[in-house]
């Protein structure tokens, strides 16, 4: 009774839900461009079977959005009123995954179709406020997201209007609860509901807005863009493992260069890469060029279907933050090589507190950086040994990247390019010619008997200053 009374006092203060209708706009097959046979036949079969069994089922999310835009979808997701157990009862090849929120994966050879039960947003209700089982934290972030709901609820809890389109391949109708078709036509990323509240519920949505804007070449609608800068620091509270996944999606989707510009502009880069963001402030041209060139390369490789390694990407994103740290350690009396090692270690450790880069990537990052110390030392058998090093290619590419960003290396990249092209006798000549160059002899800073100061002109990070 009393609770009801309080509720009625409180409700006028709640933000009205915008954009989501209780009855969807229904587009018949003549009103949209989708065709059933464009979708994965496995996904279509799943929808048909679920519907035959008496459940509601639709293709949903990215696949509907991408198809409307003429883009080949990455995967096909199905949303249904059937519970995970009911779905599994229908399909022999179905596996329930996830503990917190169960999803079903249905396997067809190498193709996996993800089937999710309609979900609802956790309401901001009184139980939450006075129970210690709260589904949100004090800033409004959703901690639990495991309530089943109706189709309408499911549309409402989705992030962007363009991601809340449901396609029924049987009737070939599209259900649009949030004016998503309108936003697709106008090329706009728009949050469903009150943008500030939706970002607070899940700050990762700010990154998703940028990801889709870059991938689809859409604008972020004004009301959805404005809260991002003030709320960007909320990303600091997101578990680092989730951020790692999101950052990979941001930078490995083929639109990393545009994504980076947008992240910086919307002040989302700082909470993700604090040290690199500082470097961007202190040394803008160099840092910006190095990172954008690395990302442009990555985008190109993805378009050409060439493999890309997250290690190279992180190595580039963090490299501009190294020199300041090396200097600081050197000023405290540490010799250059240990200072470089220590700075690299510190930087990666700090970065991992924000973004949990797994060891299988941090190791190669270090190796790519170490290679920068070794590439100038080419005398005797060193050059050939380096060529055989499995990290040589990444190290060499990284050297070229540093040069393209304006680092002075005294033609080291070109030397290595020529060396790889040369035949045996050409290579011998090239090594002999190095004799006169003190830095190339290998008698540089690694040898204790030489004093370390002033000898690292071309080694490692010096040129980045
Ligand atoms: P793509 O797979 O092409 O990157 P997508 O839209 O399919 O894009 P997913 O991350 O696969 O993106 O998510 C599937 C759907 O789940 C989205 O379309 C969206 O409706 C919903 N969704 C995903 N993450 C969130 C989130 N953080 N908040 C609300 N809804 C979300
Ligand atoms: Mg998807």
Image (cartoon, grey):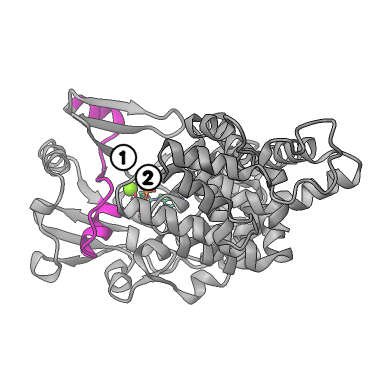
Q: Position of residue 375 (x, y in %)?
A: 60, 41
Q: Secondary structure at mark 1?
A: strand
Asked if the residue at label 2 sits under 8 Å from ligand 1, the reply is no
Q: Position of residue 189 (x, y in %)?
A: 40, 67
Q: CA distance from mark 1 to mark 2?
A: 8 Å
Q: Against 268, is 381 above or below? A: above
Note whether residue 144 is visible: no
Q: Nearer the viewer, residue 439 or 367?
A: 439
For this orientation, the residue located farthest to the right is 332
Q: Tell me which segment is drawn in magenta.
A: 60-89
Q: Are marks 1 and 2 in contact (CB under 8 Å)?
A: yes
Label 2's element? strand
Q: Is mark 1 within 8 Å of ligand 1?
A: no
Residue 383 drawn in magenta? no
Q: Magenta includes 74?
A: yes
Residue 191 in sight here: yes
What's the residue at 48%, 44% (across, down)? 419
Q: Is residue 94 left or right of residue 365?
A: left
Label 2 belongs to which residue?
119
User: What residue appears at the point 38 percent right and 32 percent down from the top-left corner?
Assistant: 102
Foreground: disc 1 or disc 2: 1
Which residue is the extreme one toward the top? 92
Measured as percent of width and height from the top left, residue 428 is found at: 51, 37
- Relative height, residue 137 to residue 410 (above, below): above
Q: Is 46 left or right of 219, judged from the image as shown?
A: left
Where is residue 258? Give x, y as percent.
46, 65
| Residue under pointer 1 | 116
């Amino acid at each position: 009774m009393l609770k009801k009374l309080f509720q009625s006092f409180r409700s006028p203060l709640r933000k009205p839900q915008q954009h989501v209708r209780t009855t969807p706009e229904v587009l018949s097959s003549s009103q949209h461009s989708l065709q059933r046979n464009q979708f994965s036949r496995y996904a279509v079969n799943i929808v048909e079977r679920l519907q035959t069994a008496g459940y509601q089922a639709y293709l949903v999310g990215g696949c509907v959005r991408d198809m409307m835009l003429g883009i080949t979808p990455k995967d096909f997701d199905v949303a249904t009123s059937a519970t995970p157990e009911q779905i599994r009862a229908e399909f022999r090849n179905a596996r329930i995954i996830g503990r917190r929120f169960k999803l079903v994966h249905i396997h067809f050879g190498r193709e996996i179709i993800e089937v999710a039960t309609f979900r609802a947003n956790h309401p901001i209700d009184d139980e939450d406020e006075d129970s210690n089982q709260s589904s949100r934290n004090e800033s409004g972030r959703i901690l639990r997201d495991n309530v089943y709901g109706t189709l309408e609820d499911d549309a409402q809890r989705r992030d962007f209007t363009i991601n809340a389109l449901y396609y029924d391949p049987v009737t070939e109708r599209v259900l649009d609860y949030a004016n998503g078709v309108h936003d697709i036509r106008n090329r706009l990323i728009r949050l469903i509901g009150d943008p500030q509240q939706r970002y607070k519920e899940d700050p990762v949505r700010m990154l998703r807005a940028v990801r889709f804007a870059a991938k689809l070449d859409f604008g972020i609608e004004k009301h959805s863009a404005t809260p991002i800068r003030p709320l960007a620091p909320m990303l600091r509270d997101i578990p680092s493992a989730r951020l790692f996944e999101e950052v990979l999606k941001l930078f490995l989707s083929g639109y990393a260069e545009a994504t980076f510009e947008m992240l910086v502009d919307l002040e989302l880069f700082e909470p993700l890469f604090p040290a690199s963001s500082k470097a961007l402030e202190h040394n803008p041209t160099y840092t910006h060029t190095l990172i954008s060139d690395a990302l442009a390369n990555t985008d190109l490789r993805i378009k050409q279907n060439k493999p890309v390694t997250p290690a190279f990407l992180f190595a580039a994103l963090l490299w501009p933050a190294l020199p300041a740290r090396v200097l600081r350690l050197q000023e405290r009396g540490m010799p250059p090589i240990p200072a470089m090692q220590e700075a690299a270690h510190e930087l990666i450790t700090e970065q991992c507190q924000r973004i949990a880069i797994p060891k299988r990537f941090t190791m190669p990052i270090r190796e790519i950086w170490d290679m920068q110390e070794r590439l100038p030392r080419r005398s005797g058998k060193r050059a050939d040994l380096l060529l055989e090093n499995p990290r040589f290619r990444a190290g060499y590419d990284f050297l070229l990247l540093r040069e393209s960003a304006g680092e002075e290396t005294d033609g080291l990249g070109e030397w290595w390019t020529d060396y790889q092209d040369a035949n045996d006798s050409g290579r011998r000549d090239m090594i002999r010619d190095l004799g006169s160059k003190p830095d190339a002899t290998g008698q540089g800073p690694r040898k204790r008997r030489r004093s370390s100061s002033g000898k690292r002109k071309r080694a490692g990070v010096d040129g980045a200053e």
